[in-house]
Image (cartoon, rainbow, N blue to C red):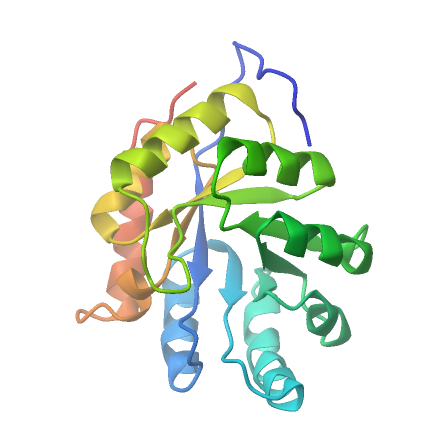
Amino acid sequence: MASRAKAADTRRPVPRLYLVTPEDPAGVGNALGQALEAAEFAAVLLRLPDDAESAQFKWLNAFRPGVQEKGVALLLDGNAALAVRAGADGAHLNGVEALRNALPRLKPDRIAGCGRLASRHDAMVAGELGADYVMFGEPDGAGCRPSLSAILERIEWWAELFELPCVGFAGALDEVEPLARAGADFIAVGDCVLSDTRGCAVAAAEAVRRVANAEVPA
């Protein structure tokens, strides 16, 4: 992690999109494929129910080709060991201790992301441990999120001081532009794209437009 101050004359590139699946993968395949056709995503975070590992392995193998063949990184939520065995590109870990425990399995060949960071201190520790990105604003286990203003404040603080990429989680398409303007390197979208009543392709294309419309800060 680059814990040094960000150079004043650098400019972050336009944020990229990061797609998060629902925990129940049944019926997601078609929507996921349509979203990946409609917009360019940097990564897909596959969330799976707490089933037997054999069932999780089956789901991961079902999704992996359609994601990776498009040049999109496939990350598995919470299970670094399974991510490695099944050929995923990495894992997203919830909290500093989960990250710490997973790093020996993931590094140096795979991505290790970290979310559920309750404080600035936790985010800095995750970066110092070797996370490839930190995520702010995702729902907790009960589906609760910080306020948008709190998420924006955290992203602005991080973007000003650190080089390590951060992901801002958009709970609705209306949040995409504010997160981009705050300095997020990636914008995570989930149900607001995959469950949009207009169709996920329409929603994914709208997310792209909203990113493009944002004034990305220096």
Q: Is residue 83 placed above or below 130 in the rendered structure? A: below
- The quadrant holding residue 35 is bottom left
Residue 210 appearing in the image: no
> Which residue is situated farthest in the top direction here?
8
Q: Is residue 114 placed above or below 53 in the rendered structure? A: above
Residue at 29 percent of width and 54 percent of height: 171
Residue at 44 percent of width and 60 percent of height: 19
Horizontal arrangement in the rendering, residue 138 relative to residue 127 (left or right): left
Q: Is residue 105 placed above or below 2 in the rendered structure? A: below
For the N terminus, which image quadrant?
Answer: top right
Horizontal arrangement in the rendering, residue 24 relative to residue 163 (left or right): left
Which percent across, then down, holds residue 115?
52, 50
Horizontal arrangement in the rendering, residue 15 relative to residue 152 (left or right): right
Which percent across, then down, holds residue 125?
64, 36
Q: Is residue 194 placed above or below 119 in the rendered structure? A: below
Residue at 75 percent of width and 69 percent of height: 84
Q: Name the foreground residue: 32 vs 139.
A: 139
